[in-house]
Amino acid sequence: MSLLLLVAATWLSDQFAQLLGSTGITMLFLLAMVWIAYAFELGIALMAACLAFAIINYFFVEPKYTFQVGSIESWASLISFLVVSVVIASLVKRLKSQTLLSNASARQAEFARKVSERLAEVHDYSALSKVACQQLSEQYALTFKVLDTTQPTEQVVFDPHALTWVASTGQSMGPYTHNWPDAEYWLIPFSRLPSELPVMWVGAHAGKSLMLLGTKSMLLAIQSHVVQISQAYQRIQSEIRAKTAELTAQQEAMQSALLASISHDMRTPLTSIWGASTALQQLPNVQVNTETAHLASIIVSQARHLTTTTENILSLIRLEAMPAKDFKLDWQSPEEIMALVTTYYQQRGDGTEIQTHIDAEDALILANPHLLLQAIVNLIDNAKQVAQDAAPIKFEIYAREGDVRFVVEDSGPGFPPDFNVSQIKKFSTTRAHGLGLGLPIVQQIAKLHDADFIIENKVNSNKQTGARVMLIFKRAQLPV
Amino acid sequence: MKQAKTSILIVEDDAQISEFLQLSLQSQGYATSIATHLHMAKAIFFDTKPDLVILDLGLPDGDGRQFIHKVRQQSDIPILVLSARQMEQEKVDCFSDGADDYLAKPFGVHELLARVKVALKRSAMMSLRDHVVHLDALVIDRENQVVSLNDEVVHLTPIELKLLLLLARKPGKAYSHRQLLTEVWGAEYVDDTHYLRIHMGRLRARLEVNSATPRYILTEAGVGYRLASI
């Protein structure tokens, strides 16, 4: 084809030699060279340039029909033609290659846009995985799979160690990489930083080899698509988190409203019953009448029991629903906690006798004082119910090197053999009274404080002499 | 006879609760008036100038805290808050607003009457504007900044003295952690409650017979501290 073009240029130059002159003939051949350089490989273009040089010399440079050159000017023209032809051939070739690259980039960008559009429409992980793999598979004629690094599936063949390595380093592996270049698949992480985000597996269709089908530029293009997919994946993650947070907030709001309602509807009548019955006890005519005074004391006692039960139910609901953000810890002095407990029982005035002992000078713990007080009161009330022979309950606090222990001891029958805190269940009790909420509440409070809750029986000379329950808090390190 | 002249305003929207409150208080010789709404409470307060207010926070026409603000603009009388809400922050807010005491519902009348008695006694002491606070064996001379226990001067560190004098400004009133830390250490220390715990512990060690059952410096759980008033 290039030869025909040179023949045509020779013929035209021969026919119109007078009209074109030597400059016009040279330009005509240069035009032919531009076309040849654009249409054919660089080697052919260079050969054509040399041939054109020879044709011009033979047919149009004096003396004609010889390869001799008659003048220095002619030599200069011919050499200039040759140089310009070679340069044009090279430039046109480069231009063509850049055009091709630009077209390829445009196609790549168009494909990336399509992928983005499709990914924007999906709102769950499985749809994302399906759409992304389908799109890439159609584009590159390879197989794509999204692998979950925490629970990898066995649908495709891969080295689990390689998967772990890719996720933990954020680097790709497979052909055209420095990592496992002999592998028959690529593993491309969703994140270039160590993460638990998924990894894209890329391999050839059955019976074909990725080593033959894949190229370095293909790997780079696929890596850029994986970045797109990763962004879509993280968007979905954020959407799911936002939705979960919204649902949690709704649940919390409902729970709060329910709690507030129960709290008001239970506490208000209880306030009337308890308040009115204690007011009744104070009236002079009630105090002198033994039967009426006894009846009033029954109402007071039952109102107090009902109050405790209601408070326990509300506490358990509140504790179980308590979001971590609402749980505020502050520095607490064990001495103050001891004082709160003794003041509580003094104010309650029901004759609970408690033997206290404290050895925790300057020790501090991080705790919520209301919850800790509630836990200790529950333990002491439990102990009081089982205490025998009106023996006092022991409540001790002592600090050790790394912890502060709150210990309640009673002289009751103790817990069943092999009983431990893991067996504590809500609404499960062996006693005639109570709903079995005391210990679950203590357990929940210990959990919220990251404290240990230990139950054990006291044994003296092989004889069980009561029970001991302990809440062990980590001793707080004071900030410098 | 003196008690019969003491008037108490009960601000409570629940008729049954206000009824037994009235009955119990009257049986102890107090004169009572009842307001079921915020606007009624304001009107009665300005008309009768009561000696003490018992205030329920949840009122049909507003929050009882508004009434605390209103009263504190005019008077220093004791305000005892009753609430079924039991929110720690609400308790702190009530004390910050100027409430003197806080009682969670349900409660027994004995406890209420005891608190009323303490609040009135404190109020009477405050009206004397005495610079010397006497609490059994403990004497705090606020003007001369001298503290003595069992007739012996107690040597306190500057911080311990500052803390005690602050509490002694109004015995019986609860001061929040924030108030104490701000006034004694400075505003930048409001979150350093461990300072307070340690210094209060040491102050108790100097003043109390048994720090675990304190007589003078009382802890208001989750709120702060108060100096005993009787």
Image (cartoon, rainbow, N blue to C red):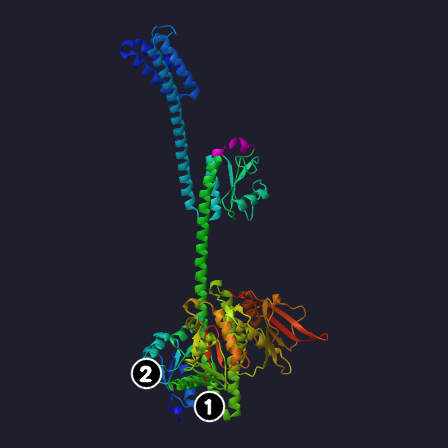
Q: Position of residue A431 (x, y in %)?
A: 61, 75
As helix, strand or loop, the secondary structure at mark 2 comes to helix
Amino acid type, callout 2:
Ile
Q: Nearer the viewer, residue A51 or A255?
A: A51
User: What's drawn in magenta, residue-wise?
Assistant: A207-217
Q: For the residues labelled 1 and 2, say whether their Cβ atoms are less than 8 Å apart.
A: no
Q: Is residue A216 located in the magenta-colored stretch of the structure?
A: yes
Residue B170 shows in the view: yes
Q: Nearer the viewer, residue B108 or A131?
A: B108
Q: Which residue is mark 2?
A: B44
Q: Position of residue A246 (x, y in %)?
A: 43, 58
Q: Is residue B76 located in the magenta-colored stretch of the structure?
A: no
Q: Which residue is mark 1?
A: A283
Farthest residue to the right: give it. Answer: A461
Residue B24, picture quadrant = bottom left
As helix, strand or loop, the secondary structure at mark 1 comes to loop
Horizontal side of A352 relative to A125 (left or right) equals right
